[in-house]
Structure formats: C-alpha cells, structure tokens
Amino acid sequence: MPFPGMSQDDMRKALSELDQALFNHQQWSEELNRTLICALPPDERDVADESYRHCRFGQWLYGAGAALISKHPSFKEIVDAHERMHQLTTDMLAAMATHGKVPLDLYERFMNSLNQMRLEILTAKRELEDSVYNIDPLSGAANRAGMLTRLREQQALVKRGIHSCALAMMDFDNFKRVNDVYGHASGDEVIAKVAKLVMSGMRPYDLFFRYGGEEFLICEPGANLEEAHALLERLRADIEALQFTASDGQSYQITASFGLALLDPDISVEQAIERADKAMYAAKKAGRNRVEVWEPSMSAAA
C-alpha cells in the first residue's frame, strides 16, 4: 500500500492539505516568474538560509506534510527536489542581482527540478485519491474499481519472470444465517472485523479487494502455492477464533473458505480469478472452513 497505516480520515485530511500546499506552491512559482521577468526585488524568504523551509509549501512539507505523507515511497524524492529547486532559485536571483539576467543552463536546471518535484507530488496525490475513492467504506478493503488493472500489473511481472503471484478467493461460510439470526448490523460488523483482521495479517505489499458481498480477493505477489497456502491457513484459523456478540448478548463465531490459484502468465487475469473462485467453491463442498488449491479437475467438474 502507498500509505501504510493511514486511516481513511487521515488520507482525506492528507489529500485536502496536499491540495492546499500545491495551490500555495503554484502561487509561489507565479510570483517567482513575475520577479524574474520584471526584474522585481526578490522575496526575502527566497534568498534566506534554508529558503526551502520558508516558502508556504516548505512550511507544510516540514510540518503537517511530513506527518501525513512521509510514509509514501516518494517522500524523500519530493524533499530532495524541493531543496534543489530552492537552491537553484537562490542562484537565479543572485545572477539577476549581479548580471541582470539568468543563464539559460541555470534556468533549465531549475525547471527540471521544478518539474521533477511536481511529478513526484502529483504521483503521491493520485495514489492518495485512489486510496480515498477506491476503498470500500465498510470493510476498508479496496473495491473492484481498479482491481483488474492492479492484477494485470502483477501478471506482467509474472510474465517477465520477476516473481510468482498467488490469488485467493475468500468467502464467509453460512453468512446469510448471520444476517437472518443476528441482524444486518451484525453482518456488517462481521465484514468489517474480519476484513480488518485479514489486512493486519497480510504482508505490506499484498493486495486485498472486496469482490462483492462477503467475498474478498487476496493477491500475494512473490508467493508460490505453498507460501500462499500457509498464509491463508493462518488467516483461516484467526477468523475461526474471532468472537462476536449480537445485540441480544448472544456470542457467535464465523468461518471462511478459501480457494487458491496462481496468477498464470498464459491465461487472462479473469480466468485466474475464476480458478480461485472454483477452488473456493470446492472448499465449500468439502465441508467449509478450509483452503483448497485449484486443479484442472475442478474446471471439469464445474
């Protein structure tokens, strides 16, 4: 995940503050261009020591921004590009004061740094937007909006021989009974609580999607069938151990069935999902609360 450990509220706050910081940065850029083109006196903050800390974007970046987006992989690149851009700004303003113009190579290096910083920031912003708007609000898992795109990215890595990748379909057992006996509020609690448990037990780079209803899809990059099976068995046991309490005080538990398949480079992503789905139904047929690995006979049986 691009923003590990961040809640939906944190990501929304980060996105709002990032938008404001980008607006402030755009205003700074326009003011700098006006200063250079019209030979105006420079803003004192742009020629001060550590000028990158004094602009409004820098104040945000080293304050709230550091707390909100420092977990993003490109945070260091944003910081480095921002500092480099301000150093070149100082050099340009010094050249203007001394020679009345900015050397072309200096201006081009400034623009390269400016564009690099903007690219890194906009990448982080797009990933924040994806995380905010493509998350299922009940479970906290990703929804299906970008699922196939993410899985095709993984399949491309499989095709290039970079790593293997496992897919698993997870479905709660007898979930209709939870809604019928304990009410839909209890059903929502089960979905939210189990999803949270699964996400806490996954590796940071695993992907987790709410496929529909009480069905979820797990993508495990770098995992072979044996490694993926071990992870799913642990998740299965953890789910079985969860305790729930209905509004009338009754205690109950839930189990889940899993179907496992590899993301095969020779078939479509949709077919790989179908294999995992058939394996999951085989787990249901074999008694539920278990993990089944897809095999060709399952397609023949279907």
Image (cartoon, rainbow, N blue to C red):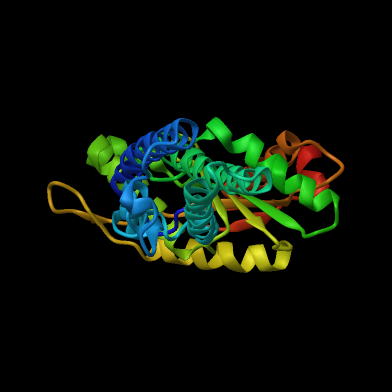
Q: Say left or right for 262 vs 195.
A: right
x, y percentage for residue 145?
A: 54, 31
Instruction: Using the image, determine if residue 123 lies above or below residue 195.
Output: above
Figure quadrant of residue 182 = top left
Name which residue lies at 65% across and 63% down: 228
Name which residue lies at 13% across and 53% down: 249
Instruction: Using the image, determine if residue 72 lies above or below residue 103.
Output: below
Q: Say left or right for 229 vs 184.
A: right
Q: Say left or right for 44 vs 247.
A: right
Residue placed most toward the observer, 245 or 114: 114
Q: Say left or right for 175 vs 244.
A: right
Residue placed most toward the observer, 20 or 192: 20
x, y percentage for residue 41?
A: 36, 42
- Say whether residue 7 is visible: no
Quadrant where the C terminus is found in the figure:
top right
Residue placed most toward the observer, 18 or 222: 18
Name of the residue lying farthest toward the front: 99
- Say whether residue 202 is visible: yes
x, y percentage for residue 275?
A: 72, 42
Name of the residue lying farthest toward the left: 248
Residue placed most toward the observer, 89 or 184: 89
x, y percentage for residue 106?
A: 63, 49
Name which residue lies at 63% across and 57% down: 220
How many numbered marks have been drawn onto this rendered protein structure? 0
